[in-house]
Image: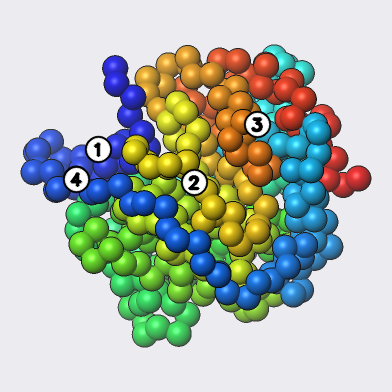
Amino acid sequence: MSRVDRRTLLLAAGAALAGGCTAQPAPPAAKPTLAPTVTSTGTGRKVNRPGDPKAKPDAHKILAWMNALPQRDSKRVVAGQQLSADARADYEKLFRGMTRRFGKTPALIGASFDGYWKRETIPVLIDHWRAGGLVTMELHRPNPFLPKVDPESYRGDLWAPKGDLSSLLADAKPSPARNRWRKDVELLGDIIQELDEAGVTLILRPFHEANGIWFWWGQDYKTGKSDSIKLYRDLYTYLTETRDLHNILWAFSPARPWDGPRMRYYPGDDIIDIMGPTSYLNTVSFAVEGQAEDISDMLAPERPMALLEVGSGEPFDGSWKSTEIIDKIRTRYPQMTMFNCWHGWVDAKVALIEVSETDKLMNDPWVMSLENIDWRG
């Protein structure tokens, strides 16, 4: 089978959701978007402190530690694993299973605030933090512009016009879509508050891959625009000011530039702490076919780099070599300080424990596991 990248998979899924079993004419193929010209990103804020002026001590400590990792000779890249909504079962399989099999446990744990969210995820994250690990979370919430809640509607008809994201903001006029979204935001605040009360610092990466057309918060296919920056900053204001939560490190997570430049929807130096791009394919890469592997645009803000979502392409049979992650970091992306491998799904083996050469990966001298992570000193 030919390799299938993340965008192809999402396009196929979106087409299936939009048209059921009826084939639809494909739109003109988008031309690869060349790497953007690197320009000033705003405030020039120093990277040795979080953007939130009230950030808690552990947020400061983690960020300073991440900034120093690329200068190390070893133990410089944190190994991570994403959980599904079945957090307890996944932790037993994907974390403790790794411990039993390899003697090494992923140090970074990832969770998704999605339409399948279960409250049982919170104590799993807290326990991992208390064991010395780090915690990250992204959002895959259902599309608030749809009248019926569908957990899978975070993606949908790729070619249809996107909803007006500015209508979801705190100061927007009341509407059904806004009401649905504000409830989600309140629930997210409750989750982060509970983590805060347990002492957990969260690496949060909302509205990831906004430069792609596959999510409801992403770029509109026809207009090539999105108000995701406004939505990101609105969420930042709600959590840090309205809810007074300061246990967050804020990450920006762009996709490959199939539809728009990676930094087009960058929320700004004043609030972003970590650059956390994604990569799906059997070769870790941040470019599109025919484009040079130039990541100067993501390096320009001088934020710590973290591969906060990574996985293989087809055939999803477990044959993918996870050592591809650290090999590419070592030879091409030495600025990377973390990687977070996605969980598998039905008939797809993607998680670290399910793919090949993970023992070699976890024992690589550059890789940190839960057993030897040292951010706490």
User: As shown in the figure, which amino acid type bears the numbered disc 1?
Assistant: Ala
First in sequence, mark 1 or 2: give its number. 1
Rounded to the nearest angstrom, the CA distance separating label 4 from label 1 is: 14 Å
Task: Choose between 324 and 230: the one closer to the eye.
Answer: 324
* Residue holding disc 2: 294
For the point 74% across and 75% down, which residue is it? 53
Element type where label 4 sits in the image: loop
* Residue holding disc 1: 12
- Closer to the camera: disc 4 or disc 3? 3
Q: Position of residue 361 (x, y in %)?
A: 66, 22
| Callouts 4 and 3 close, C-beta under 8 Å | no
Element type where label 1 sits in the image: helix
Residue 21 visible in the snapshot: yes
First in sequence, mark 4 or 3: give its number. 4
Find residue 29 and name its label: 4
First in sequence, mark 2 or 3: give its number. 2
Rounded to the nearest angstrom, the CA distance separating label 3 from label 1 is: 33 Å
Rounded to the nearest angstrom, the CA distance separating label 2 from label 4 is: 23 Å
- Closer to the camera: disc 4 or disc 1? 4
Rounded to the nearest angstrom, the CA distance separating label 4 from label 3 is: 34 Å
For the point 43% across and 42% down, which residue is it? 292
* Residue holding disc 3: 330
Q: Position of residue 331 (x, y in %)?
A: 62, 31
User: As shown in the figure, which amino acid type bears the numbered disc 2?
Assistant: Asp
User: As shown in the figure, which amino acid type bears the numbered disc 4?
Assistant: Ala
User: As shown in the figure, which amino acid type bears the numbered disc 3?
Assistant: Arg
